[in-house]
Amino acid sequence: MEPSSLPGPGDRAGGEPPEEFRAALEALAGVTTRPEIVLEAIPAPQRLAPHAFAVGALVTEPDGDELVEVATGRFIVLHDPAGHDAWAGTTRCVGYLSATTDEHMVDDAMFSEVAWSWLTDALADCGATSHALGGTVTRTASTRFGELAGPEHSVDVEIRASWTPDDGRLDRHLSAWLDVLGTAAGLPPPGVRLLGPATP
């Protein structure tokens, strides 16, 4: 399976965007990711800023002859040429992800801090400098009863974050968010392939 790439930015709110925002979005079209992650442009929120663009991401893994969803994410870029006091800038990146993770992690008191470090480390590793970073990490444990399909016990992690990029290299910021999504989904590091069970 080939790496996934993002279609050209075309789903924008607020009419023709200014050159600053248009150039930043063009960088997103060049982002490619690992084959387990599929990207697509999705409708952007209309009321948060004069201009916006959104990317959806889906992570799957094989389960027999089928692919099952293990994580989803969104990456939204908001732009207000007039600036925004809460952003301390004109452009804001917003990320959301939800992933099924190891059920034993729900009992780890440090898990939220570790999950948040996935984002701070990924931003640093991708050279995506930013400020005014904030967000939440939420863990949810579920137990299924009766005839409801699925594993008996499961744990989901949700990460919501927003930050103001220090430059127009939004490709670096999207790449960082996709790294976080892959980590939350339990994907091995890029270039590493997990060995399956030995065959006689």
Image: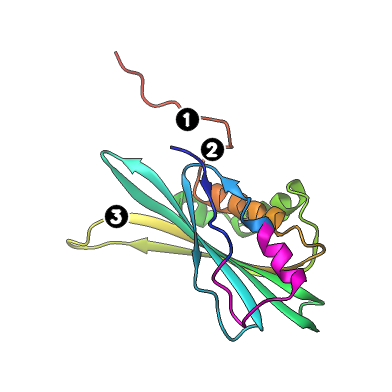
Residue at figure coordinates x 47%, y 30% from the top left: 194
Is 37 situated above or below 7? above
Magenta-span inclusion, residue 187: no
Quarter of the image where one finds residue 134: bottom right
Q: Kindly identify which residue carries mark 2.
A: 188
Report the residue at 59% width, 55% height from top.
Answer: 111
Task: Compare residues 124 and 57 and report the one nearer the observer.
Answer: 57
CA distance for labels 1 and 2: 7 Å
Q: Distance between the residues labelled 3 and 1?
A: 25 Å
Locate the C terminus by quadrant: top left
Magenta segment range? Answer: 10-26
Name the residue at 54% across, 54% down.
Answer: 6
Image coordinates of residue 168 in percent, x first then y, are 77, 62
For residue 145, side relative to residue 12 (left or right): left
Q: Mark 3 points at which residue?
A: 152
Q: Say what secondary structure mark 2 lies in.
A: loop
- Looking at the rendered structure, the kind of residue marked 1 is Leu
The mark that comes first in sequence, 1 or 2, is 2
Q: Evaluate whether residue 73 shows in this view.
A: yes
